[in-house]
Image (spheres, rainbow, N blue to C red):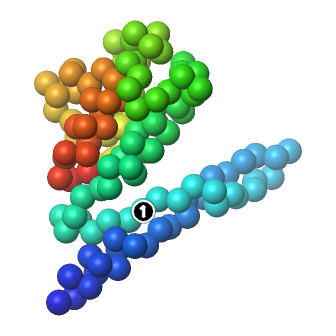
């Protein structure tokens, strides 16, 4: 009973994640990013949340022009990234979603579309 209640509550809780800006040596926290929490194993991520988070990770990659990032963008063809950049993006996605993508699968992820599909279908993504 308690685990069912916990799962129901966690499906609807949204927790602000602080972002910090440095202003002349002092720090200012902003609460403009919101992450949904989910109960482990009780359900999996909403596809829209996966899309949003994957796109955010790719947009934050230093060599990427954020205005070019869409759910269908190819890392090398559309963004001009190389294979090392591709590996770094996959590693950033692993960190973002708290999962480990096997090398065999990671080598296949060369676009936002494939990253979204892999993460959305992965039961342990969080």
- Give the answer, above or below, for where 64 lies relative to 9: above
Q: Residue at x 43, y 73 (%)?
A: 13
- Could you tell me which quadrant the N terminus lies in? bottom left
Where disc 1 sits, the SS reads: strand
- Give the answer, above or below, for where 119 lies relative to 7: above
For the image, the number of numbered tags is: 1
Q: Residue at x 46, y 29 (%)?
A: 70
Question: Is residue 88 shown to the viewer in this render?
Answer: no
Residue 113 in percent (x, y) is at: 32, 30
Seen from the viewer's position, the closer of residues 19 and 115 is 115
- Could you tell me which quadrant the C terminus lies in? bottom left
Seen from the viewer's position, the closer of residues 3 and 78 is 78
Left or right for 24, reference 30: right
Q: Circle 1: is it few (<14), some (14-19), or many (20+) Cα within 10 Å?
A: some
Q: Give the labeled residue for mark 1.
A: 36
Residue placed farthest to the right in the image? 24
Residue 63 in percent (x, y) is at: 54, 19
- Give the answer, above or below, for where 25 lies relative to 9: above
Q: Residue at x 29, y 78 (%)?
A: 8
Q: Residue at x 59, y 26 (%)?
A: 67
Seen from the viewer's position, the closer of residues 12 and 25 is 12
């Amino acid at each position: 009973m308690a685990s069912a209640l916990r799962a129901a509550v966690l499906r609807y809780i949204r927790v602000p994640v602080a972002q910090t800006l440095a202003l002349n040596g002092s720090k200012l926290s902003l609460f403009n990013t919101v992450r949904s929490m989910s109960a482990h194993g009780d359900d999996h991520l909403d596809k829209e949340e996966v899309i949003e988070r994957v796109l955010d990770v790719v947009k934050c990659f230093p060599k990427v022009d954020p205005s070019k990032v869409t759910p269908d963008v190819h890392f090398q063809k559309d963004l001009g990234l190389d294979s090392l950049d591709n590996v770094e993006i996959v590693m950033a996605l692993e960190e973002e979603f708290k999962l480990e993508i096997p090398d065999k699968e990671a080598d296949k992820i060369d676009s936002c579309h494939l990253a979204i599909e892999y993460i959305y279908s992965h039961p342990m993504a969080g």
